[in-house]
Image (spheres, rainbow, N blue to C red):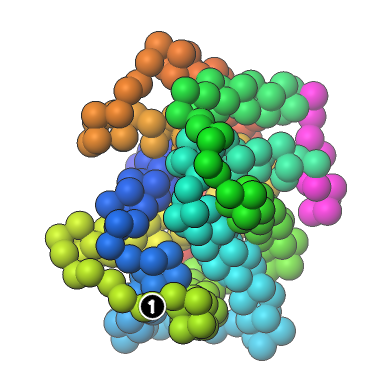
Amino acid sequence: MKLKLDSLIAPLFVVIWSTGFVIARLAMPYVEPATFLFWRFAGVLMAMACLSLVWRISWPSWSQMKHIAVAGMLLQFGYLLGVWFAVRLGMTAGLVAIIVGLQPILTAWFAAWVSERVTGRQWIGLGFGFAGVALVVAEKIGFAHIPLFSYVLAFAALLSITFGTLYQKKFCPVFDLRAGSSIQFGVSAVLCFICMYYFESGIMVWNASVIGALLWAIFPLSIGSISLLFMMIRKGAATKVTSLLYLTPPTTAVMAWFLFDEPFTLMMAGGLLLTMTGVVLVNRGQASVVATIAE
């Protein structure tokens, strides 16, 4: 039974993580990025506070808290705000996806930082994965009327999630997931509030789309997918873990086709198969070991 549950964690993570662009599509017309993310992080903190009344949380030392907070600023605040603002300023979701899709290759380049060795087979898999992502989003990319600052924000998001993953793997790979989530979302909420206060109106139109997007972002997307990501980072090699993110753009394309009737062509289907091949090459041979929620 445990083996079956372990084998479901990676695909479940990909599906939930891929809904991020769907959430942006639903909420973007009614709220600014930092404002939405502030309410999202605040909601996660309230949920974690309720959980802390039921489950005993083991809080890390002050020195480890600082490392967890730095990783959270990169994985939560830097990545999400960069992507959302890039889209807000006019960059297409497809172009953001392919830029962020460079993360596994960038992670492989810096893998030596966490004492990991990337094999030749893994490099081939990484190349297949990126080629598949490129095919999936190629028809969605639009270069016209996209401000230069959108590119700066998208690449900042790429660097943020890449170094956040590596930083957490190196400095704080093991901690109580509930405590770590509270710390990371708390720091990100404060930073988003500052951005909202100084750079946005703070207005959010409360309708069904926004409420549904917010609830999904708080529970399955933030608490669910981030916990799964932490579990994989804790026990898996960083390059292998982040290679799973190659599946995000193709999965998002399928969701957009189903929910919003966006086109899903044969070229995109071929890219999905190529991406899956790349992920298999990168992850083949790794033992399926998953951490518990607290160690």
Specify the quadrant that holds the N terminus.
top left
Furthest residue in direction left, as rendered: 208
Q: Is residue 102 above or below residue 221?
A: above
Q: Is residue 147 above or below residue 69?
A: above
- Foreground residue, 205 or 256? 205
The residue at 16%/64% (across/down) is 207
Furthest residue in direction front, as rendered: 145
Q: Is residue 104 above or below residue 295?
A: above
The residue at 55%/44% (across/down) is 146
The residue at 83%/53% (across/down) is 113
Residue 163 percent coordinates (x, y): 71, 57
Task: Give the crowd class for mark 1: few <14, some 14-19, many >=20 residues within 10 Å.
Answer: few
Look at label 1 and name its amino acid: Ser
Q: Is residue 4 above or below residue 187?
A: above
Residue 292 lies in magenta, yes or no?
no
**Res. 93 image quadrant:** top left
Residue 224 percent coordinates (x, y): 38, 58
Residue 193 percent coordinates (x, y): 46, 81
97 horizontally vs 54: left or right: right
Q: Is residue 33 visible?
A: yes
Specify the quadrant that holds the C terminus.
bottom right
Circle 1 residue? 201
Q: Secondary structure at mark 1?
A: loop
216 horizontally vs 82: left or right: left
89 horizontally vs 65: left or right: left
How many labels, in total?
A: 1
The residue at 64%/49% (across/down) is 148
Q: Is residue 173 visible?
A: no
Residue 156 percent coordinates (x, y): 66, 56
Which span of residues is magenta-colored? 110-120
